[in-house]
């Protein structure tokens, strides 16, 4: 067992030693060397989705939810109307953000194991011309379900509506191409598939949409337009940036590119996911989602069918063997989640399965 348990969570992740070591230096927030790091991070994030010609990358202090709220508050006019298809907790969070911000919101509700339908989006947009934006969670982290981004993006574009994508658990591992997938904003964060530390979100916004947003935002700190204009003029963040996180994220992105970018990172996670699914099936644990809609990011499993099973005890026993699981987030079933991201050590997913198998054997031997 490692003295520091591996994180099988959807972020924060277990990050590389090289990324951790990049946080050992202090940086001046207005210093030219740090400004160069910020510029490099922004440029590389745009390059990942081939967006440099049409989009801008605006980094923001805070977790992914800060970025989602900033995108909605900045890009959706105060008289705007957002359509949110809901099949999990993070879709529901977007709906709550809209309501808190006073943005009109309409939802299309699905079961937690049912992907969003592009046909439903198309019909809703045709029926209601007041809808200005669609807000979609690409990979719904509460289950691991993958929603059909490309089809929904094309439906929104056909109707001339803006698309805001929560790509928190897909950016960097699943291909998204700004040249062929139309969107007004895409939000992700440092502590996800790019394997940096948590603490920084970023919004990749269509330049033409961002230019129209002055004065929209409800918040000074979360105003993406203001942040973008200031960065363009000064190369600096408006307010104190998370300097160590930005430097570590820069190191993480360098390693992502060295590994082979989206294709290689996605392939590693997909291999982790296949190994996990096959191994858990051998251990008698059932996956919540069918394979066709399971993203290779995080997997939800039904709880073991045993009268003495309790998640907290199960969690503690697996943690004692070196791995930290994640609780379920479903309303309809007793589940737990296992992430496929991050640096999982020499044993990789085999070590995870060994730990879970040992705990299950103890549980099933108990009376």
Image (cartoon, rainbow, N blue to C red):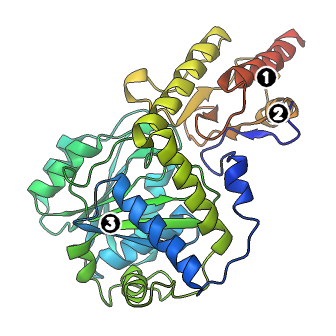
Q: Secondary structure at mark 3?
A: strand
Q: At which x and y percent is residue 180?
A: 19, 50
Q: At which x and y percent is residue 209?
A: 23, 74
| Residue at image mark 1 | 355
Query: In the displayed structure, would residue 65 be above or below residue 89?
Result: below
Label 3 vs 2, first from the N-terminus: 3
Circle count: 3
Q: At which x and y percent is residue 14?
A: 69, 45
Q: Residue at x 56, y 61 (%)?
A: 250
Find the distance from the CA under tag 1 to the CA under tag 3.
44 Å
Q: Residue at x 56, y 40 (%)?
A: 330
| Residue at image mark 3 | 105
Number of other residues with Cα within 10 Å of mark 3, as a class: few under 14, some 14 to 19, many 20 or more: many
Circle on res. 130? none
Q: Is residue 212 left or right of residue 36?
A: left
Query: In the displayed structure, would residue 97 be above or below residue 135?
Result: below
Q: Secondary structure at mark 2?
A: loop
Q: Are marks 1 and 3 in contact (CB under 8 Å)?
A: no
Label 1 vs 3, first from the N-terminus: 3
Q: At which x and y percent is residue 48?
A: 37, 53
Query: In the displayed structure, would residue 141 be above or below residue 353?
Result: below
Name the image quarter holding residue 46: bottom left
Asked whether residue 129 appears in the rendered view, the answer is yes
Number of other residues with Cα within 10 Å of mark 2, as a class: few under 14, some 14 to 19, many 20 or more: some
Q: Nearer the viewer, mark 1 or mark 3?
A: 1
Q: Are marks 2 and 1 in contact (CB under 8 Å)?
A: yes
| Residue at image mark 2 | 322
Q: Nearer the viewer, mark 3 or mark 2?
A: 2
| Quarter of the figure that contains the C terminus | top right
């Amino acid at each position: 067992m490692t003295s520091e348990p591996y994180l099988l969570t959807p972020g924060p992740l277990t990050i590389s030693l090289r990324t951790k070591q990049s946080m050992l230096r202090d940086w001046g927030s207005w210093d030219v060397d740090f400004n160069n790091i910020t510029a490099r991070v922004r440029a590389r994030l745009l390059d990942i989705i081939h967006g440099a010609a049409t989009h801008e990358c605006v980094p923001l202090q805070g977790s992914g939810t800060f970025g989602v709220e900033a995108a909605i508050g900045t890009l959706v006019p105060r008289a705007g109307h957002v359509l949110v298809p809901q099949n999990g907790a993070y879709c529901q969070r977007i709906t709550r953000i809209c309501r808190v911000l006073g943005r009109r919101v309409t939802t299309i509700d699905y079961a937690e194991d049912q992907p969003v339908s592009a046909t439903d989006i198309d019909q809703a947009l045709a029926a209601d011309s007041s809808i200005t934006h669609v807000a979609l969670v690409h990979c719904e982290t509460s289950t691991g379900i993958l929603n059909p981004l490309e089809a929904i993006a094309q439906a929104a574009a056909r109707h001339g509506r803006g698309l805001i994508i929560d790509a928190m658990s897909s950016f960097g591992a699943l291909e998204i191409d700004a040249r062929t997938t139309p969107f007004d904003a895409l939000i992700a964060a440092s502590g996800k598939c790019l394997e940096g530390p948590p603490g920084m979100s970023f919004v990749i916004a269509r330049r033409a949409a961002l230019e129209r947003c002055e004065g929209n935002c409800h918040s000074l700190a979360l105003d993406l337009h203001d942040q973008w204009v200031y960065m363009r003029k000064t190369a600096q963040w408006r307010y104190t940036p998370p300097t160590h996180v930005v430097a570590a994220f820069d190191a993480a992105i360098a390693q992502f590119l060295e590994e082979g970018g989206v294709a290689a990172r996605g392939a590693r996670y997909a291999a982790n996911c296949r190994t996990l699914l096959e191994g858990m099936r051998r251990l008698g644990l059932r996956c919540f989602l069918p394979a066709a809609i399971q993203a290779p990011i995080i997997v939800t499993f039904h709880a073991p069918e045993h009268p003495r099973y309790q998640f907290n005890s199960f969690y503690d026993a697996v943690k004692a063997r070196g791995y930290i699981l994640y609780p379920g987030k479903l309303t309809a079933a007793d589940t737990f989640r296992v992430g496929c991201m991050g640096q999982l050590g020499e044993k990789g997913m085999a070590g995870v399965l060994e730990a879970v198998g040992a705990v299950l054997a103890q549980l099933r031997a108990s009376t």
